[in-house]
Image (cartoon, grey):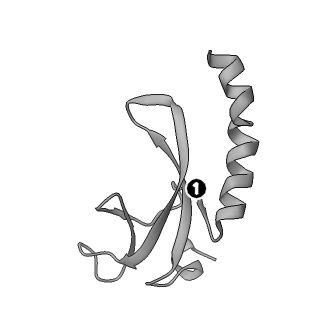
Amino acid sequence: MSIHEQYNPGDIVYCIIRNPHAQDVANVQHAAVVQDPSNPDGLALFLYETYYPLTDEFAIYPTEAEAEAAYQDAFGLAEDREDFYG
């Protein structure tokens, strides 16, 4: 099943987003699935006032709990990261 078959316009999803200016910073952010304004046959994520084409390159989860669990698997607990970085 393609990513476009999994979601519909109006769905709210949760993404793990890395800060492009600080690669050791990431967070879970909600986004809306919308019709892609530059591709009428495609879908996009509306995130931070910007449209991003919906592709498999995004770590997208249907619930905040699933996104938080994936975040913990990838980055560990906040106190673990503080010990590592600070």
Q: Where does residue 29 sit, x and y in percent of width and height?
A: 51, 56
Q: In the picture, residue 52 is in which quadrant?
A: bottom left
Where's residue 23, x and y in %?
49, 30
| Secondary structure at numbered mark 1 | loop
Which quadrant would the N terminus be assigned to in this image? bottom right
The correct choice, above or below, for 79 with respect to 83 in the image is below
Quadrant showing the C terminus: top right
Name the foreground residue: 27 vs 53: 27
Residue 19, quarter of picture: top left
Side of 40 relative to 66 (left or right): left
Q: Position of residue 43 (x, y in %)?
A: 40, 76
Q: Is residue 70 above or below residue 39?
A: above
Q: Is residue 41 above or below residue 26?
A: below
| Type of amino acid at the residue the image marks with label 1 | Ala
Kindly identify the residue that appears in the image at 25 percent across and 75 percent down. Answer: 37
Residue with the mark numbered 1: 59
The residue carrying pointer 1 sits among few (fewer than 14), some (14 to 19) or many (20 or more) residues within 10 Å by Cα, namely some
